[in-house]
Structure formats: C-alpha cells, structure tokens
Image (cartoon, grey):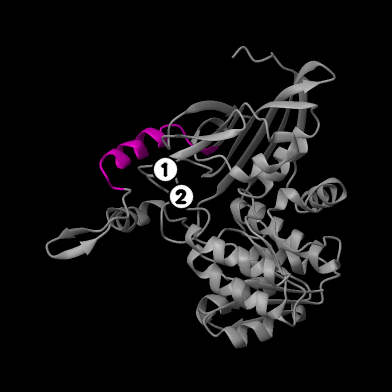
Amino acid sequence: MNILVIGSGLMGPAAAYNALSDPQVSLVTLLDMDEGQLATAAARLHQLVTNGKRLETAALDLSDQTAVANIMARHDAIVAALPSSAIPMGIRAAVAARTPWIDLSWPPPSELPELEKLVVENGALVIPGCGVEPGLTEIMARYIAEKLDTVDELHIKCGGIPAQPSGPLSYKIVFGGRRLPLREADARIAENGGLRTVPRYSGVETFTVEGVGEVEAWHEGFMPWLLELDVLKDLKLGTQKTVRWPGYASKVSLLKEMGLLSLEPLSVDGVQVAPKAVLDAVMYPHVQMASEDRDITILRVEAHGCKKGRPRRYRVDMLDRYDEETGFTSMARVTAFTGAIVARMVARGDLRATGWVTPEKLITDGLFQQLVAALAEAGITFTLTKEKSKPLTG
C-alpha cells in the first residue's frame, strides 16, 4: 500500500507515523508547500520509525494541480490534514487522479455542492470529517444507537483541552493553526426528527471525568447527517457539545456579545479589519501550545432508548493523553490516527465505496472492530457502559 499524507503541521506527521507503523505499507509520502516545515516533520519521523526508507516527501503547492495529481496517482489513498480553505483544490486533484480522499476536516460549506457533484459524477470517493469530531463521535454514536431497538436521546460530548488549565481561557489550540475555534453563529440540536437552532455556548453542563476532574460542555452543533441513519431518524433529542475546562463558555459568550467573534470587517483608522482576526492575533500568544504543554482529549457518547421494551442507556467513553514517547499531542493521535487507519482500509480494499460519504455510514460491523483494534494498538481505548435508564417524561 502507498499512502499520501497532505499537510505537515500538527496532524499530518501523526497520520504518516501511524501509516508507517503498518508493515503492509510500502510507501508514505508527506506533501506540503512549506519546505521548512516539511523537512522538520520528516526529520522527526525518521527519528521515530525504524524503516525510514519508506518515507518520502514532496514540496508542492496544491495550485499546481497537474503535478499534485501525478503524485496522487502513485498512491492508493490520501489522508488530508489541511486548512478548510485548501481542501477544495486537493479534492479536485484527487478526483483527477482517481485516488480516494480521506479528510480529517471539511471544506468550506459554500464549496460543498460543487465538490459533492464532482465526486459523485466521477465515481470518486471522499470521506470527509474522518477524525475525532467529526469522525469517531459519529461512528460511536451509530454503534451504541444500534444496540437499542429505539433511540430517544443521543448526546455527544468531545473536546481537547490542556492537561493543566492556564491562561485567560484555560485553553490551548490543540488542532493546529493560529485561530481560535470560536464562532458566533447559532448551533443546532436534533429535536423530534428535525433540527432546531440554539445559541452557541449555551446549554452548559458540567460533568466529572475520572483522572481529570470537573469539565464543562456546551452546544457546538449536532451533525445533521446523523439523522439520515435509520436508527436516528425519529430522534426526540440530540445534542453535540464541546468539552472545555469550567468557565470557558461564559468567557466566550462575553466575547460574542461584544462582537469580537464577528468576521465582518470594521473600519478602524481607515483600515478594514475583522474583530475575530484581531482577537486571534491578540490571543495567540496565550493559547499557543508551548513545548512543555500537554493535552487531553475527552469523548463521551450516550444513547437513551429502549431494548426489548425496557429503558436502557449505553455510553462510550474515551480519555486520551499526550504521548511522551512520540511527542504527538492527544488531539493529533485521536484525529490523525483515525484518518490514517481508515485510509488503509480503503487502500487494502476492505472498504469499497464511491461518492461523498461520511465515516459512520461506512465504519460498521467488521470495519468498526478493525478501527477500534487498530486504535487500541496505538493506546487509544474506549469503555462501553450499559445500564437501565429512566424513560422520558417529556
């Protein structure tokens, strides 16, 4: 198998490392337009793996579609670890090369209709949102939902946080880039088989994670494609919340009320500037992951419903930490390893599909077990809990 990883920031090297850990992989190519960052990532990987001859690098800009497509055509699957804005160029080249594209993220919403049409018309395969969230959260949601005869409620909580809260937001950017993952748009919840908007950063609830302590979660937005699953089409209540250290939501809500999350430019002394851009620039020194920082990723998915006429609740928990041996953040591990494992399923022919397909529609049954086993080999494990549940009272 030949695997191409595009992007050499926080996520790409972790995906390449995971692919190189598989003896069935003959070649891993790491591609990026930033030659310095690419060289640093390659040097790090050569220190971590025993057979570095299987690793190659390619310094290319995605705008050079012909050259990029030629490299893609030499590979059996692609793992994309790119900023959202760069994804469309990559997908167009992948379609031309007829190489499956497994994405840790999603392209901009405005580009989706055209990209989906392109992929479907050409019989290509794109698996978007194949990381931790979206990705593992929806895969686990389907897994536990299908253990019930009927599902009334589904609640997803997930987030990456610094192991030790520090700074004004008790938060560090664990996914990559220089922008805070903050938006002013409303979030969505599922309600009676449909979707309803609620204020983002509302619905704050606290819960305790063993070995971590008390954390909070707030509305980030229910993934609407979950309602396409037969088992969830009549869902009475579904929520998807982001996990942070306590106090985060109230602080960010204040920033939102002040207009500091707006992307609309304002004129300041004759210069057009978006408030969010200023906030990102001011906050970056406070939220940048330093070399001594460590992170934690928390995932909890709960499904409430009935099994054989009796109320039941299933819950999946995952807690992952920074890897001291490899130096990969927990967020890189749970995100990039997931994408790299699924890419190898595609490359081996275990997963055969075409179209624009989210991972929970594909990773079921034997493929689900394969994914969980491969993550367990990397030290990422899940705990399943089953217990009686009180019926809904309305």
Q: Residue at x 85, y 69 (%)?
A: 23
Q: Residue at x 58, y 70 (%)?
A: 7
Residue 28 located left or right of residue 236: right
Instruction: Give coordinates of residue 27: x percent, y percent.
Output: 77, 78
Q: Is residue 61 visible?
A: yes
The magenta stretch is: 241-260
Q: Does 3 appear above or below 194?
A: below
Q: Does 116 appear above or below 259?
A: below
Mark 1 lies on a secondary structure that is: loop
Q: Which mark is residue 166?
A: 1
Residue 353 located left or right of residue 90: right
Q: How many marks?
A: 2
Estimate how packed mark 2 is, as few (under 14), some (14 to 19) or many (20 or more) residues with alpha carbons within 10 Å.
many
Estimate how packed mark 1 is, as few (under 14), some (14 to 19) or many (20 or more) residues with alpha carbons within 10 Å.
some
Q: Which quadrant of the figure contains the N terminus?
A: bottom right
Label 2 vs label 1, nearer the camera: 2
Q: Does 355 appear above or below 228?
A: below
Q: Which mark is residue 172?
A: 2
Q: Is residue 323 visible?
A: no
Splitting the image into 4 quarters, where does residue 156 fall?
top right
Amino acid bearing label 1: Ser
Instruction: Give coordinates of residue 355: x percent, y percent.
Output: 71, 62
Q: CA distance from mark 2 to mark 1?
A: 8 Å
Mark 2 lies on a secondary structure that is: loop
Q: Is residue 291 magenta?
A: no
Q: Are marks 2 and 1 in contact (CB under 8 Å)?
A: yes
Residue closer to the observer: 328 or 4: 4
Q: Is residue 257 magenta?
A: yes
Instruction: Give coordinates of residue 242: x percent, y percent.
Output: 52, 39
Q: Does 288 appear above or below 315?
A: below
Q: Which quadrant of the figure contains the C terminus?
A: top right
